[in-house]
Image (tube, rainbow, N blue to C red):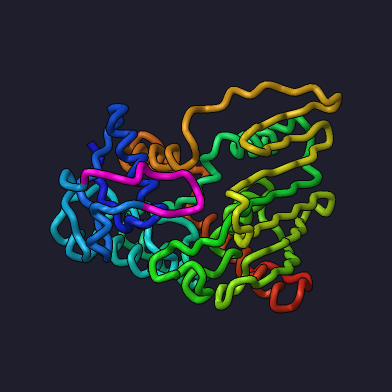
Amino acid sequence: MIRVGLIGLGFMGRGHLDNYIKLEAEGFPVKLVAVCDIEESKFGGTIAGNLEMGAGEYDFSKYAQYTDYKKMLEEQELDYVDIVTPTYEHAEMTVYALNKGFNVLCEKPMALNPEQCDKMLEAAKRNNKLLMIGQCLRFWPEYCVLKEYVQNGKLGKPVMGMFYRGGSTPRWSYQNWLLHEGKSGGALLDQHVHDVDMVHWAFGRPTEVSVIAANVNPHSGTDAVAAHYRFTDGDLKASAQDNWALDGSGFGMLYRVNFEKGCIVFDRGVLNVYDADGKDIPQDLPQGDGYYRELKHFVNVVAGKEVITENKPESSRDTIAIAMAEMESVKKDGDWVKVKY
């Protein structure tokens, strides 16, 4: 049985909690034994967010409860720690946990900059511990199909990819940290980073980025982003847009990718793979969304049943490097900027 300690019971933390409850109910060999949040009131409260996630009310009496994560790590015997806290805390908490001898699953984005990511990687290597970042699209069934078709070549080479996600402004975060650029990186690093990572994972490292952005909310830095990517393969192009200032619209994500011999479209929760004649190719998708599947994978990794192949922390670090180039391009009003890996 893999024993887990969960740090952070905000919106995403409750989503992780919900999936641990689901996995335990299914008989999967994982047990959440301890929870930690700086706000003690969270142990009996409700959640808020821009996605349908978490049951809203939980019985926390079954878990050891902490408001100090260091105390939790001192007192609990855990096989890994799940860190689901604000981005500006990721590096410090992850390094501390690794140095204390715990494996770590850390929510995305990995950290605020590549330098912090490097400290996390160094700590994992130095302590011979596992580290994985929760880039959930790498486990999302509809996005895994895209990756599969890029790799298997059944539709030929990809030539153009377009990605999008957006929704209402996240005004529900702890002390409004999401709308402070220095703590979250704004929409670019917090929400858009999902599609940055997908462009990176599906198509490989982009060499240059060109990005324009708009600021709607004070202090957030970026609220709407439009990014373009160039690759070593000059025939491949990609773009990604994000907007978290669409109040009232509800959350949505989609992608459209053209291949030499067909296309793949994911929109409104529906995936279609079309061949060169426009015929829809049925897909057999695995059960569970990306959050569920990433937790299940990491439990198996810690148990020694699987290895991290598609979501190595070094790759998550490179996604942050791409995002840093995007931020630089924003400051230059969309000039092409080379990515420094």
Q: For the view shown, which residue lies furthest in the left direction?
A: 75
Name above or below for residue 294 compared with residue 81: above
Residue under the point 60% across and 54% down: 248
Q: Is residue 118 visible?
A: no
Left or right of 325 on screen, residue 18: left
Left or right of 332 on screen, residue 287: left
**Magenta region, main secondary structure:** loop
Hey, which quadrant is residue 98 in on the image?
bottom left
Name above or below for residue 23 compared with residue 193: above
Instruction: Decide which of 51, 211 is in the foreground and name it.
Output: 51
Estimate the x, y position of residue 82 in percent, counting from the top left.
Answer: 33, 52
Name above or below for residue 104 compared with residue 137: below
Left or right of 331 on screen, residue 96: left
Residue under the point 71% across and 73% down: 329
Estimate the x, y position of residue 338 in percent, counting from the top left.
Answer: 72, 69
Q: Is residue 302 visible?
A: yes
Any magenta on residue 73?
Answer: no
Tag count in the figure? 0
Instruction: Decide which of 1, 228 is in the foreground and name it.
Output: 228
Left or right of 128 on screen, residue 116: right
Instruction: Decide which of 89, 54 is in the foreground and name it.
Output: 54
Q: For the view shown, which residue lies furthest in the front direction?
A: 248
Name above or below for residue 224 compared with residue 53: below
Estimate the x, y position of residue 14 in percent, counting from the top left.
Answer: 36, 49
Quarter of the image containing the N terminus?
A: top left
Hey, which quadrant is residue 62 in on the image?
top left
Give the residues in magenta: 47-59
Residue under the point 47% across and 32% down: 288
Quarter of the image containing the C terminus?
A: bottom right
Residue under the point 80% across and 38% down: 259
